[in-house]
Amino acid sequence: MSSATLTVSPEDALIDVPRRIAVNGLAPGEEVTLSTHTLRGPGVVWRAHASFRADAHGVVDLQRDAPLAGSYSGLSTMGLLWSQAPEQEGASREVFAAEPASALATEVTLQRHGAPALQARLVQRLQGAGVSRRELREEGLVGTLFTPAGPGPHPAVLVLNGSGGGINEPRAALYASHGYAALALGYFKAPGLSDYISNTPLEIFETALHWLHRELRPLNGFVALSGQSRGGELVLLLGSLFPELVSAVIGYVPGAVVHSAQNACDPATGREGPAWTFRGQPLPHLWQNNRSASWDAWDKGPEPRRHANALLTALQDPEAVERARIRVENIRGPVLLLSASDDGSWPSSLYGRMVTERLAQFQHPYAVEQLDFEGGGHSIVFPYVPTTQLVYAHPVSGRLSTTGGSPAINAHADEASWAGTLLFLEHATQTPPGLQA
């Protein structure tokens, strides 16, 4: 058997850097299998595999070659990462490490004639060289601050999670690795906070914005908001309520209206109770006095259920929609919306259009962009993490549902959305405050 080499280049880099995985020294036309193995979350093994045929020079190169069969199909340089699935059915869906901002190490194995032959290592980092991490526990704030290398000042980003709660350290760490001081802020299901989204006071975020401006003194006073799902609803809401504190808004699969507590609710107040309060009063929300809203499409729908179907019934009452609509026209900065047409959690494509149309109606004097991914689902994250777990039990309600999309399309959305976000932030930070983008 000829002597072969397996290479991964670069071996160690940020998670959003694509790698070249290649095998040299095979026999011409030889069929081999490449597999990956990554330990994620609470010690769960995730795997993928694919078979390839060497070219006339005995080379397999994943930048050039599509697999013959395996965990993914079609040409995809990083298919052996995004197509990974947990080894055990029903295991944790957490795609990051046990320590959320820690590096992920993947073993790449070459099998020839059915036997393991060679191994290589692939390391994906969220926290780049020189990025510092510190926990924030002051003024009632619960979060983690990631600061880029170098003296600064740096532009800043406030990072908010969705209905799963917690503190989104991976995204904040990656923002910091690209030059942004990033505060991942928890507002429920975080140390010392409520287990539920119900009756979350928006003053938490007002305090956080003041803290960022005062303590970090960001470059040119730039503070962007970046939120996912309920966090995407939240960043539009905060930008509309505190326009003097917000320089730009990035909404991942956002909502265009204020929603009730839904599946992350406190059982004592229920899913139709308020999610947000401001100055001591609950905000009007979509389900409130809604004449068309029905949970039947969610409660009685076939498994896996699509939460979006219930929300579509609520959107049929124009008066309720108008009462709950987020006044995005008050935002004083550019807006980026990242949405998907097969979003199973809520209709983010429609919500994105509602926001862009509203801003156009008011002749918003800043850049507005919607990147809408046809056939994509709700779980748009960033590049080169597994996208295979489309059906899940909600972390609060426990209901089995689908986020929508397909693994390959969602992997494309992960990659393209992150490239779009970095470009958006680059332009936003270079535009002098108050000037049209």
Image (cartoon, rainbow, N blue to C red):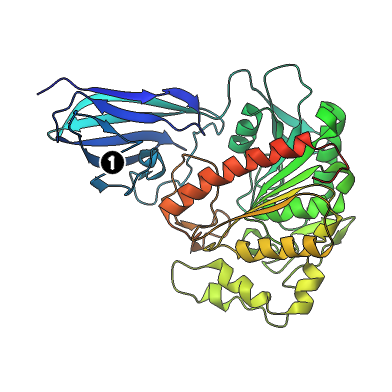
Please state which amino acid type lies under the numbered disc 1. Answer: His
**Is 20 positioned to the left or the right of 131 in the image?**
left
User: Please, is residue 214 above or below residue 425 in the view?
Assistant: above
**Is 373 positioned to the left or the right of 47 in the image?**
right
> Of residues 67 and 98, which is closer to you in this image?
67
Q: Residue at x 64, y 48 (%)?
A: 165
User: Please, is residue 25 above or below residue 282 in the view?
Assistant: above
- Could one spot residue 184 in this view of the protein? no
Q: Residue at x 64, y 29 (%)?
A: 178
Which quadrant is home to the N terminus? Answer: top left
Q: Position of residue 267 (x, y in %)?
A: 66, 63
Q: Position of residue 419 (x, y in %)?
A: 58, 40
**Is 144 positioned to the left or the right of 123 in the image?**
right
Q: Residues within 10 Å of mark 1 (few under 14, many from 20)?
A: many
The image quarter in which residue 175 lies = top right
Q: What residue occupies the far bottom of the structure in this picture? A: 291
Q: Residue at x 83, y 62 (%)?
A: 282
Helix, strand or loop at label 1? It is strand
Q: Residue at x 87, y 48 (%)?
A: 243
Q: Position of residue 429 (x, y in %)?
A: 76, 35
The image quarter in which residue 311 lies = bottom right
The image quarter in which residue 437 lies = top right
> Of residues 141 and 311, which is closer to you in this image?
311
Q: Which residue is mark 1?
A: 49
User: Please, is residue 388 above or below residue 325 in the view?
Assistant: above
> Of residues 209 and 82, which is closer to you in this image?
82
> Of residues 106 and 368, which is closer to you in this image?
368
